[in-house]
Structures are given as C-alpha cells and as structure tokens.
C-alpha cells in the first residue's frame, strides 16, 4: 500500500507540525513517535500524562430491537454481566476454529445500542461477520472514518480532562456522554497502557479543537504527545496482546490466555463448542511473558529454544522496557514450559537467557477508582 492510499487521522496536520515520524498501521498513516522519542513518551504516561491519537481504531454501531442480545449471542464475553454505561473487553471468534478474528471493546448504551471499537485492520471483517447473521431489524453501521479517538493516559489524566470540562472519576470500564464545543463526546474510562486514563470518541470536525484544548490543559502537568511506539512498549509491559502478533485467527482465547473474556456459561457465541472442547482438554500452547536475565532485547520473529538445539516457538512481541530497563517479550510457548523456566532467545546470533513469567511485567494503577 502506497502512502497515497493510506488513511489519515483528522489530526494529521497537527502531528506533522509536532515533527512526528509516521508508520503504516492497519491501513492508516499514524504517528510512530515525535521528536521527544519513545522512551520519554513512555515515561510521561507512567509518571504524569500523555495523549495519543488512536483514530485508526474502528467504530461500529449495532442498533435496533435486540441489538445487545445479538452481540451477546455472537461475541465471546457476556454483556449480561454489565449494565448500560459500562464497557467490556470481548472477542470475535471464528465459529469453526475458535480462532480470534479480533479483540475489541463493546460499549453498552442500552438494549438497542451497542458501540463496538475493533482494531483498525479488522473492522471491515468484524462488521461483515456481524451483518451476515444479523436478525431482521438489527443494523451494523461502520463509522470507522467519521469519528476520532483520543487517549489521555497517565496519573494526571483526570486533571487534564477536568481543565477542559469533561467528566472524570467514573468507574474503570465505564463511559459517560458529554459535550465539548457544542458537540457530543463519549468519555470512556479505558485504555491500552495499564495506567489510569480515558479514551475520547468525538466527531472528526471537533477532534482538532479537542486535541488542542487537551494539549494546552496538560502543559502544566508535563503532558507529551505520544505515538504508537510508546503505545507498544506500554502495552507490552502490561502483557496486553496485540492482534496480528500475539493473537490471531490461528490463536484461540485459551491459547492467548484471554479466556477470562469468554462467557463460558452462555448458550451461544461464535466458536463456543470448539473452545469448550479445547478448554476441557487443555491448550497445547500458552501466551507467556519473557523477562531478560541479561541485556538481550527480544523482537518479534526471534527463535525461542528450551536448549541450544530444541526450538520451541518464535517471539510474538518483544521490546526494551523503559520502566524495567530490561528486555521483555511475549511468546506462545508449549504448555509444558512452566513459569520460572529459563529459555533462550536468538538475539542476532547470540543465545540470550530469559525467564518465563506471567505478565504484567510492571504494576500500575489502571483499575484504581
């Protein structure tokens, strides 16, 4: 895909003015990092506050009589566990294989309105699958390119939103509808960094004004604009899987250790029978964390071995942790490899030793009230 074919955020010009380096992500040209660099952006989120443009994320509305019931009968998690005004991490699985088509957030407005936020590259497929089986009266509308998503993340995120008159302090995984500049904004207590924070969904025509107001309000708190590079290091420190690397159509929720996002007692959801059978038998591989004992930094695709000549798998995600000052990663290891074991990773021809651990790699405040 050429640069001319890539979609751009309504905030693209602001990123250019900030000296952003861009990268292709899910068919979009998005900021990878700014002049400050990934480590400083990462640290700003962990210690104060950062702002991300994540407008590449999908936005789809499921509406009509029985909309929530339909979502509950297809996606993995149980919407019956939450009330209107709450959000839920859930999975769209393939009915035949149980593989993960996408992981997404469902925002339950009421019985007839559910907002879904899938990953950029998978939005069209999630919408297609939902439309294919939707009962009469239920409609799925793709708003991928008409709404922007801004993420304000970090210990000072409440203070920044307070300064621009947006609601704060609501429960983790909940949302409120507010007004900014005479336009509706959905303020979600969600995020992908492991820190306290909010995601704001707003129409494209107000996104620039909202970004400017948040940046100005955050100046006294040391707010930095953050790119997808810092987003990746932050989520890896939390062990949050990335679709297309750690989880995919070839990986089931059991294998990816996201079975907690499955409503196992529900009568229906895509992939239910095959996933129940795998759960009963036990998956043959599990997504686990890798923590460097030395100076090695793992990268996706690097070989993981139990001994020098016994290959196990490849690293799925890997990076340098700015918080720990060590290499960390994720890998789909055979289930017989237990936590605490030592494995080798081929880092540019050197066999570096890593300890198998259960993420997160760092402690954070994401669920604090």
Image (tube, helix red, strand yellow):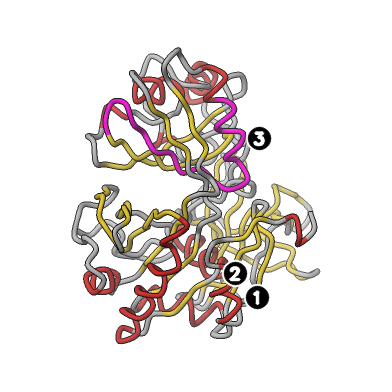
Q: Rounded to the nearest whole Å, what is the CA distance between mark 2 and mark 1? A: 6 Å
Q: Quadrant of residue 223?
A: bottom left
Looking at the rendered structure, the secondary structure element under dot 2 is: strand
> Closer to the observer: label 3 or label 2?
2
Residue at 54% x, 63% y is 232
Crowdedness near tag 2: few (<14), some (14–19) or many (≥20) residues, C-alpha within 10 Å: many
Residue at 35% x, 74% y is 213
Residue at 28% x, 73% y is 160
Q: Is residue 136 above or below residue 252?
A: above
Contact between labelled residues 1 and 2, with CB atoms less than 8 Å apart: yes
Residue 21 — which label? Answer: 1
Percent of width and height locating residue 257: 48, 41
Q: Is residue 136 above or below residue 165?
A: above
Please say whether residue 99 is one of the residues in the magenta stretch: no
Bounds of the magenta span? 110-129
Residue 251 — which label? Answer: none
Contact between labelled residues 2 and 3, with CB atoms less than 8 Å apart: no
Left or right of residue 184: residue 240 = right
Percent of width and height locating residue 130: 52, 25
Residue 250 — which label? Answer: 3
Percent of width and height locating residue 15: 56, 74
Query: Along the polypeptide, which appears first: circle 3 or circle 2?
Result: 2
Judged from this view, the residue extending furthest toward the front is 182
Residue 31 — which label? Answer: 2
Viewer-proximal residue, 71 or 241? Answer: 71
Q: Rounded to the nearest whole Å, what is the CA distance between mark 3 and mark 2? A: 29 Å
Looking at the rendered structure, the secondary structure element under dot 3 is: loop
Crowdedness near tag 1: few (<14), some (14–19) or many (≥20) residues, C-alpha within 10 Å: some
């Amino acid at each position: 895909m050429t640069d001319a074919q890539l979609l751009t955020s309504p905030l693209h010009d602001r990123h250019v003015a900030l000296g952003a380096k861009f990268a292709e992500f899910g068919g979009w040209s998005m900021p990878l990092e700014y002049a400050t660099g990934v480590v400083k952006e990462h640290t700003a989120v962990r210690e104060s506050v950062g702002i991300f443009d994540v407008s590449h994320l999908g936005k789809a509305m499921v509406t009509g009589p029985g909309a929530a019931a339909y979502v509950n009968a297809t996606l993995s998690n149980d919407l019956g566990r939450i009330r209107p005004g709450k959000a839920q991490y859930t999975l769209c699985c393939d009915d035949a294989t149980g593989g993960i088509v996408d992981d997404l957030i469902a925002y339950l407005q009421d019985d007839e309105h559910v907002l879904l936020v899938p990953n950029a590259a998978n939005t069209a497929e999630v919408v297609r699958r939902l439309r294919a089986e939707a009962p009469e009266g239920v409609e799925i509308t793709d708003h991928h390119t008409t709404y922007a998503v801004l993420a304000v993340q970090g210990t000072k995120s409440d203070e920044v939103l307070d300064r621009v008159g947006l609601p704060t302090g609501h429960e983790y995984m909940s949302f409120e509808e507010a007004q900014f500049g005479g336009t509706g904004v959905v303020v979600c207590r969600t995020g992908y960094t492991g820190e306290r924070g909010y995601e704001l969904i707003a129409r494209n025509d107000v996104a620039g004004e909202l970004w400017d107001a948040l940046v100005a309000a955050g100046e006294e708190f040391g707010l930095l604009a953050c790119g997808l590079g810092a987003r990746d290091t932050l989520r890896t420190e939390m062990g949050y899987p990335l679709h297309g690397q750690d989880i995919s159509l070839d990986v089931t929720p059991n294998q990816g250790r996201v079975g907690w996002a499955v409503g196992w007692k529900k009568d229906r959801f895509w992939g239910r029978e095959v996933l129940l059978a795998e759960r009963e038998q036990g998956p043959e591989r599990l997504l686990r964390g890798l923590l460097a004992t030395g100076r090695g930094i793992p990268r996706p695709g690097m070989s993981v071995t139990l001994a020098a000549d016994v290959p196990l798998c490849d690293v799925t995600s890997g990076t340098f942790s700015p918080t720990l000052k060590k290499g960390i990663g994720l890998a789909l290891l055979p289930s017989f490899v237990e936590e605490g074991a030592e494995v080798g990773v081929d880092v540019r021809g050197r066999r570096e030793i890593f300890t198998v651990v259960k993420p997160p790699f760092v402690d954070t405040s994401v669920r604090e009230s």
